[in-house]
Amino acid sequence: MELLKAVILGIVEGITEWLPISSTGHMILVEQFVRLNVSESFMEMFRVVIQLGAILAVVFLYFRKLNPFSPRKSVKEKRDTMSIWYKVIIGVIPAGILGTLFDDWLDEHLYNYQTVAITLVVYGILFIIIENRNKKRRSRINSFEDLSYGTAFLIGIFQVLSLIPGTS
């Protein structure tokens, strides 16, 4: 029975990691219904391992595109790929710093199904409002080349919100 529960949790993680929804938030919600009979420390390790598996699947799928050292790429393609990596690193800095500083507090106060339920509803409503308000607007950024380093950092600042479970 525990194996079936672990498989269910793995499927939820595998599906939600690819969608613009909070995989961690959905894991927390599903854990309320599908509880593994294991210690809390094992459960934390289990979450890390299945999320790492989902992330490694993304790396595997996009490795050729994101590898700046491929001998098959032209100099321009290598430079463009490195530019993507620099922008990703700049975008990760705000959440990386705040996540490291407040990790224990976030775990203690926000990693619960109540927070997830509230954030899923609130952000769901916000996304509907924002999408409806911006239906007729055209995107000014259509590729990584269009994305400035300043905009990458601004995206990173908003990405800090993703430290709250239920936010993606």
Image: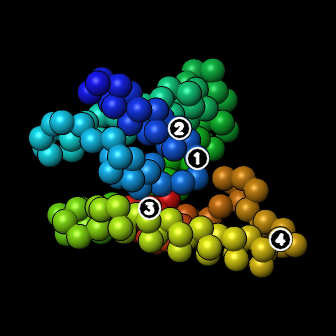
Looking at the image, residue 43 lies above or below residue 20: above
Q: Residue furthest right?
A: 136
Dot 1 falls on a residue whose secondary structure is loop
Q: Name the residue tied to disc 3.
A: 166
- The one nearer the camera, 104 or 108, is 108
Q: Residue at x 29, y 61 (%)?
A: 111
Q: Name the residue tied to disc 2.
A: 15
Q: Residue furthest top?
A: 72
Q: Earlier in the sequence, mark 4 or mark 2?
A: 2
Label of residue 19 in the image: 1
Label of residue 135 in the image: 4
Q: The residue under label 1 is which amino acid type?
A: Leu
Looking at the image, residue 163 lies above or below residue 32: below
Q: Residue at x 72, y 53 (%)?
A: 143
Residue 43 appears left or right of 29: left
Q: Nearer the viewer, mark 4 or mark 2?
A: 2
Tell me if mark 4 has few (under 14), some (14-19) or many (20+) residues whose alpha carbon lies within 10 angstroms of its own. Answer: few
CA gap, disc 4 to disc 2?
Answer: 27 Å
Tell me if mark 1 has few (under 14), some (14-19) or many (20+) residues whose alpha carbon lies within 10 angstroms of its own. Answer: few
Tell me if mark 2 has few (under 14), some (14-19) or many (20+) residues whose alpha carbon lies within 10 angstroms of its own. Answer: few
> Are the two marked residues, 3 and 4, in contact with CB atoms closer than 8 angstroms?
no
Q: The residue under label 2 is which amino acid type?
A: Ile
Dot 2 falls on a residue whose secondary structure is helix
> Are the two marked residues, 2 and 1, in contact with CB atoms closer than 8 angstroms?
yes
> Are the two marked residues, 4 and 2, in contact with CB atoms closer than 8 angstroms?
no
Count of marks placed on residues: 4
Q: Residue at x 46, y 69 (%)?
A: 119
Q: The residue under label 3 is which amino acid type?
A: Gly
